Image: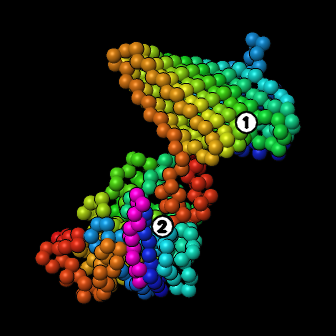
Amino acid sequence: MEIDKLTQQVLDKIDDTGFTQEGAYNLRYNGYALCHGDTEHIKIKKREDGNQGINVYISGEAKGETVHIPVVIAASGMTDLVYNDFYVEEGAEVTIIAGCGIHNSGCNDSRHDGIHTFHVGKNASVLYAEKHYGEGEGEGGRILNPETRIFLEENAVFTLDTAQIKGVDSTVRKTYVEAMEGAKLFVTERLMTHDAQTAVSDMDVVLNGTGSSAQIVSRSVAQGSSVQTFHPKAVGNAGCHAHIQCDSIIMEHAKVSSIPEINANHIDAAIIHEAAIGRINSDQVVKLRSMGLSEEEAESVIIEAFLN
Amino acid sequence: MLKVENLSFSVTEEGRTRKIIDDVSFSVSQGEMLVITGPNGSGKSTLVKLLMGIEKAEGGSIRLEDSELTTYDIDERAKAGMGYAFQQPPRFKGMTVKKLLSIAAGGKLSENNCCDLLSGVGLCAREYLNRQVDDTPSGGEMKRIEIATVLAKPHKICMFDEPEAGIDLWSFSMLVKQFEKIHREKKESIIVISHQEKLINMADRIMLLKDGRIEAIGSREEIAPALFAGGGFFGCSKTD
């Protein structure tokens, strides 16, 4: 299947590993599956419940395989609502590369709402990476509302690496996680807004099992007159550990709110939240300038590293 | 090579103006090592910050070879050949040691070059390349990485603000070796702010700064004996 230049450009932005039509993959383009492939251990099936989207079945035999499921929207005025469900069997080890890029050259809003649900079996290990990106010279908005629901069985390990890199005018991100005994969650969220963009990120992590843990790092940069709101919430219902760290760099006329919520419902629940919002550290700028970078170059290096 | 004339700088606090650097003139020739020493609060760090352009002088001039640096910004002075190591290096979230050293070198730096730089300041290189210069390295590790950033690129003149502060004795001796190497090659001039006898005794010339003015400047033979007479004064200490 040949992919046009514009789509390939957007794919390059959202899939660092390089999207190829090999192994297990599904490329969704303007609201339909453009191409897809299975492997022995990973099967991708179109949903049959009337909703748009796919079910991805990952067998316990899958060890070290990668699934690519990017979404590209190049049509102005389109709203795409997709439900993708992942069934990861006991003992599987898999990397899932998702992400959505919108190229909107028109005057109407383009919107993608991706609802991803993960059922992760005992001792399985999943790395899920998603990148969100918008571009195009049109005045129409580029709107992305991802919803991620993760259910972890005993001793499952889930690493969520989510990033909004540029060009998304409005986003409401919802993440919900439930963890059983010994399950481990690692979240890295990176978010960049500029101009008059808005971003809301709500994250609920419920630790139900003894020995379960969650480590959540959220880093954001707000430029222009953009507005960001973070509401991370951890609930400990058993002897568990959770650490939430939110760091934001605020620039120009932007606004950032960080509203942490931690709830302990068990004597052995240990939950920590740290949040900091501040401008770029002037000593960092001076250090980089003393190595020959201009003020603008120094700021962009600091931001790039911070969101790395 | 470096010629500083009538440099002045003052600060105003609660309506009162205080001279921090008061009409300071001196020069450093090519390959020369000048150690600036003196009591705390004498203006040593401010003087070097004025040279680097981090603080703006209110009077005087700074020339490096044929370039008049006085109106130059920090990055323009860096490009003109000046290097500067912070006394308290800033930390960067998300920045790896390798990335910082590459920026310092002015472009991509091979893994081997990075390792050489880190070994030169007493750090076990491979362990450090992908570590972040965030709040995880110790103060001593940060100081050594800071010095490596200055050594990453050739300069006409390198300035080090109390390189010995906050590092252990073993790292200090590695550092002394690095200074000896630069000094021996005579390609780069060095200005070091220090209270350490070992560094002071490596100097070609020593400047003693007090209350923002040069109390004495001269060869090591002229100045050093008086500094350490009677067990040390002006904040200088014996190392052995």
Q: Where is residue A221 in the image (x, y as percent from the top left)?
A: 59, 42
Chain of the residue displaying label 2: B
Q: Position of residue B172 (x, y in %)?
A: 29, 66
Disc 2, SS: loop
Disc 1, SS: loop
Residue found farthest to the front: B15
Write the residue at 49% across / 47% down.
B93
Decide: marks 2, 1 in contact (CB < 8 A)? no
Give the mark toward the camera: 2 or 1. Answer: 2
Residue B230 falls in which quadrant of the image? bottom left
**Residue A169 disc label:** 1
- The alpha-carbon separation of the residues under discs 2 and 1 comes to 40 Å
Closer to us: B108 or B88: B88
Tag 2 residue: B55
**Residue B7 painted magenta:** no
* Magenta-drawn segment: B13-25
Chain of the residue displaying label 1: A
Name the residue type under label 2.
Answer: Glu
Write the residue at 53% across / 35% down.
A218
Residue density around tag 1, few if under 14, some if 14–19, many if 20 or more, within 10 Å: many
